[in-house]
Image (cartoon, rainbow, N blue to C red):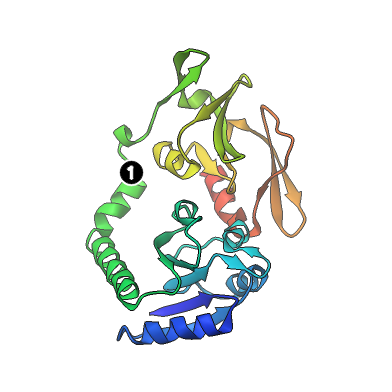
Amino acid sequence: MKLIIIEDEGPAAEKLLLSIKACNITTELLAVLGSVQEAVEWFQHHAQPDMIFMDIQLTDGLSFKIFDHVKISCPVIFTTAYDDYWQQAFEYNSIDYLLKPVQQEKLEATFAKYENIKQYFSSHFQSLMQYHQNPAADKIKKRFLVKRGVDYIAVKAEDIAYFYAVHKLVCMMDRNGQKFILDKSLAEIEKDIDPAIFYRANRKYLVNITAIKKIKSYPKSKLQLEVAPPVEEEILISQENVSDFKNWMGS
């Protein structure tokens, strides 16, 4: 198993590595990274490991920022001395949240969980591929029930321009510029909508293809989207996701 450790304290990284070795699992440590910037640069030039152990508070900010710059697809185990971020952590490929000092039995349980997940997806790979290629119609939401004043109304999915996150809230904007507050995260909404129609542009925006009015080149090989109804901030497609986005637009 190839893994990396993202930790800004050398002794903590060494202690974690010793605990991992004590689990009697064959591992290969690819790198120990101490900052958001160092991690981003590493992922831009290396293949994904099998697992990441990631501290949350690094010298140059929260490690969640790493996901704003690179696409990480492997499982992440967050290790931190704080329990304030556990809910947010599970939006970032997390399969476990371990409090420091990491207890040996907790670490062993994490590896056992990883193996169970790996075996499950391996045994169900074919059915998962079939589902990905032909998602069942009843799994896709065709309407969203939202509140307007004291009343509830149903908004058709095709009438939604985009979903976006702001100040720990998730909002929905329809084609007419009406905004509604939802009680779901963007990650939950992404599972409910048709991936052929909606695209996760970044951590903040989930956009309907029909709402995209213009695509412009942006510095550092990024793309900028102009949508309707318009937004005040820039909606950017990262360099790592440009190819995927173009394939989606042309499919």
Residue 190 pos. (x, y %): 45, 41
On screen, residue 55 versus residue 94, left or right, reads right
Task: Quadrant for residue 118, please give it.
Answer: bottom left
Say if 178 sits above or below 105 in the image.
Answer: above
State how many labels appear: 1
Residue 90 pos. (x, y %): 44, 54
Label 1 neighbour load within 10 Å: few <14, some 14-19, many 20+: few
Query: Label 1, on which residue?
Result: 134
In the image, 230 versus 109, the foreground residue is 109
Q: Identify the residue at horizontal 45%, vertical 78% (top origin).
A: 3
Q: Identify the residue at horizontal 40%, vertical 37% (top origin).
A: 192
Q: Image quadrant for the N terminus?
A: bottom left
In the image, 56 versus 32, the foreground residue is 56
Residue 216 pos. (x, y %): 74, 45
Dot 1 amino acid type: Asn
Decide if residue 208 is in sight here: no
Question: Which residue is situated farthest in the right direction here?
Answer: 219
Task: Quadrant for residue 178, please give it.
Answer: top right
On screen, residue 180 versus residue 15, left or right, reads right
Query: Is disc 1 placed on a helix, strand or loop?
Result: loop
Decide if residue 123 is in sight here: yes
Q: Identify the residue at horizontal 32%, vertical 36% (top origin).
A: 139
Q: Identify the residue at horizontal 62%, vertical 54% (top origin).
A: 242
Residue 121 pos. (x, y %): 28, 61
In the image, 234 versus 58, the foreground residue is 58
In the image, 11 versus 250, the foreground residue is 11
Say if 228 sits above or below 131 in the image.
Answer: above
Say if 238 sits above or below 175 in the image.
Answer: below
